[in-house]
Amino acid sequence: MIGPLRKLFRPRGASASMATQAAIPAGQRVYAIGDIHGRLDLLDAMIAAIALSQGLPVHTCNPKDFRGIRGLQVVAVGPT
């Protein structure tokens, strides 16, 4: 299943060996969040859930978007 996805997202003209060279360092995670059909509330909920599951704070320019989420540490950054 992953093979067709790699082929789909491979840059044009890239060989299969180029596609397998990129790697995430051991012990690190990357979260990729795709289309949520214009539902920013769902995006905020997913970000909050990931942060809570990892025990991490959320850094945001819009702290009000995360109000009322119990246990979530929100750090305001930039203009609010």
Image: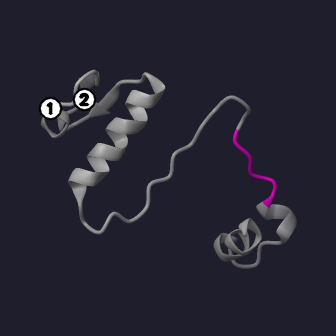
- Report x, y in % for residue 16: 84, 69
Q: Does residue 23 belong to the magenta stretch?
A: yes
Q: Earlier in the sequence, mark 1 or mark 2?
A: 1
- Which quarter shows the C terminus? top left
Q: Crowding near pointer 2: few (<14 within 10 Å), some, many (20+)? A: few
Residues in magenta, as a range: 20-24
Amino acid of disc 1? Arg
Q: Does residue 7 belong to the magenta stretch?
A: no
Contact flag, marks 1 and 2 (Cβ < 8 Å): no
Above or below residue 55? Residue 46 is: below
Q: Crowding near pointer 1: few (<14 within 10 Å), some, many (20+)? A: few
As helix, strand or loop, the secondary structure at mark 2 comes to: loop
As helix, strand or loop, the secondary structure at mark 1 comes to: loop
Q: Nearer the viewer, mark 1 or mark 2?
A: 1
The disc label shown at residue 67, or none? 1
User: Which residue is painted at 28% across and 21% down in the image?
Assistant: 71
